[in-house]
Image: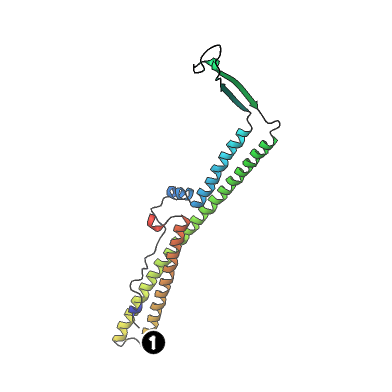
Amino acid sequence: MSDQIFPVHFETTPLNEPAFLSIKEKDSLLMHHPKMLMVQNKMDYLTLEKKYRQEQLKPQLDLKYNFITEPVNGASANSVSWNNYTWGFEFSSPLFYQQQRNELKETKLKMEDMMMTESMLHTELALNQFTAGNNCKNSADQVTVWQNVTANYTALFQAETQLFSIGESSLFMVNSREMDMINSKLKLIEYTAQNQISEIYHYYSLAILHQQL
C-alpha cells in the first residue's frame, strides 16, 4: 500500500490556545460575555427601581399658582405683577409608608439575589474558559506527539521498503511497518479533529468568533 492514499491536504497543524490573548484581555472578554451583559442589564434596571422606590418614601410638596384674569385694583389683566397670581402649597405624605417600605425591601432583595447570580455566573464562565483553554493546549500537544510518531513510522516503513528491495527484509515486515504507519496517521487525524473541536469550543467559551481575532 502507498501512503499516497492519505489526504495530502489534510491540515494537521496543532491549534494551540491563542497566545496573543493576555489575562487582562481575557478578563475583558469575560466581563463583556453576553450572559454577563444580560445580568448587568438586569442589575441596572433594579438600581433604577431602587431609586424610584426610595423616592416613593419621600413626602410630596406641590407648588401651585393661578393667573388672575380679572383686573386687580383697576390694573390691566395683561400687566405682569406678583399681584396677578395666587400662590399655594400642597403637602402630602403616606401615613405609614408600609407598602413603599415593602416594595423597597423587595427590590433590595432582588438586587442581592442578582449580585449572587452575577458572581456565580462569573465563576462559571471563568472556569469554562480555563477548562476550554487547557483542553485546547492538551489536544495540541497530542497532535504534536502523533506528528512525531507518524514521522517515525513513515521513516521505518521507507527503510523497510529499501531493505526489501535489496533482499534483506521480508514482505511480512514491510506490511507490518506499513500498518504501523497507517494506524499512526489515523491517530494523527483523530487527534487533529479533536484539537480543532476544542479550539472552536475555546472561542465559544470566550464568546468571540475566530474571524474577530
- Identity of the residue furthest to the left in this view: 166
- Residue 213 visible: no
Camera-nearest residue between 118 and 171: 118
Q: Tell me: 171 left or right of 113.
A: left
Residue shown at the point (36%, 87%) measured from the top left:
171
Q: Position of residue 143 (x, y in %)?
A: 41, 67
- Under tag 1, what secondary structure? helix
- Residue 210 visible: yes
Q: Position of residue 17 (x, y in %)?
A: 42, 58
Q: Quadrant of the N terminus?
A: bottom left
**Residue 154's image quarter?**
bottom left
Residue shown at the point (45%, 63%) measured from the top left:
198
- Residue occupied by mark 1: 172
Camera-nearest residue between 89 and 100: 89
Q: Mark 1 packing: few (<14 Cα in 10 Å), some, or many (20+)?
A: few
Q: Position of residue 173 (x, y in %)?
A: 38, 84
